[in-house]
Image (tube, helix red, strand yellow):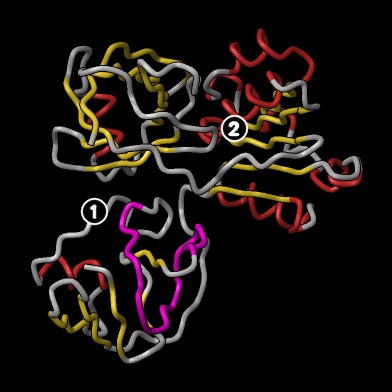
Amino acid sequence: MQQTVVDHIERVAEDVVSLVLRGATGPLAPWEPGAHIDLALPNWLTRQYSLCGDPADRESYRVAVRHDRLSRGGSEYIHRFLRQGRALDVSLPRNHFPLLPAPEYLFLAGGIGITPILPMLRAAAASDVPASLVYLGQSVESMPFADELRSSYGDRVRIVATRQQGRPDFEALASALSPGAVVYACGPGPMLAAAEGAFPSGRLYAERFRPAPRSFAPNTAFEAVCARSGRTVQVPDDESLLDALTHAGFPVASGCREGVCGSCEVAVLNGEPEHRDDIGAPVGRMYACVSRALSPRLVVDL
């Protein structure tokens, strides 16, 4: 973990605040567009937020947080109780949504989904790569960084207040894509579903804040062999691998517990995982909060 101090809190839209976290002991770890961090809050909760500042700034991180009316305690704490000067621990940045090289980009953002997209647009513009942004929100007042985007990128940014204008025609946007152009999208589930229906899958990269609804076979029990200790942990059908390991004395870092943040990644040395995450586990890895086993036994590097 890295030690930071809340340097600045600013309201940037209806129900959205921006936090600038300054390194308490020196420069912070580097990051690239698409990365996020775990924020360890004083109320004992850990939450994940996309970095939306400038990767060249090694002195501070910027994140933005929307107040979720059904908050499980994270956004509510930040909006109601967090104050300037508070010390906060943050993780090293992780990136499951990297900006890959392309001759042209179309960025789609919905609401707070602008946070990983904003540094992507900045990077494309700095590299003189053609790029445009379609930014959706119910109203302009609800859309963080709208003024910053307008002033910095002009007509490369299209702001769409859906309450008045409706959702843009994604099929028309798809038909207008130039050869080689790729699409990066982040936002609410219905927006991403519409994008997935309009853009070719090989040209669309999307990040979700909540897992997409999917069905899996019923859970079955399996064994997790912890290779470094030689111990075997029984994982019953009504318990996650993450919880079984934690209860057995092998605490694994965790955050979302929904398979979207990647904080609970463990290495698999043998056996066949059943991947249930939404971010695509690398070969030889799995996310212990949601994924299980297709084989009776998994050997993990713990």
Which of the labelled discs sits on residue 253, or is there none?
A: 1
Question: Which residue is at the front of the view, 16 or 240?
Answer: 240
Decide: is 176 above or below 127: below
Tell me the residue at 29%/16% (across/down).
Answer: 22
Decide: is 152 above or below 222: above
At label 2, the amino acid type is Ile
Question: Which residue is at the front of the view, 275 or 15?
Answer: 275
Tell me the residue at 33%/37% (across/down).
Answer: 92
**Mark 2 element type:** helix
**Mark 1 element type:** loop
What residue did someone put label 2 on?
Answer: 117
At label 1, the amino acid type is Ala
Quadrant for the C terminus in the image: bottom left
Residue 53 picture location, percent across and down:
48, 21
Tell me the residue at 87%/41% (across/down).
Answer: 177
The alpha-carbon separation of the residues under discs 2 and 1 comes to: 26 Å
Tell me the residue at 50%/57% (across/down).
Answer: 279
Span shown in magenta: 263-282
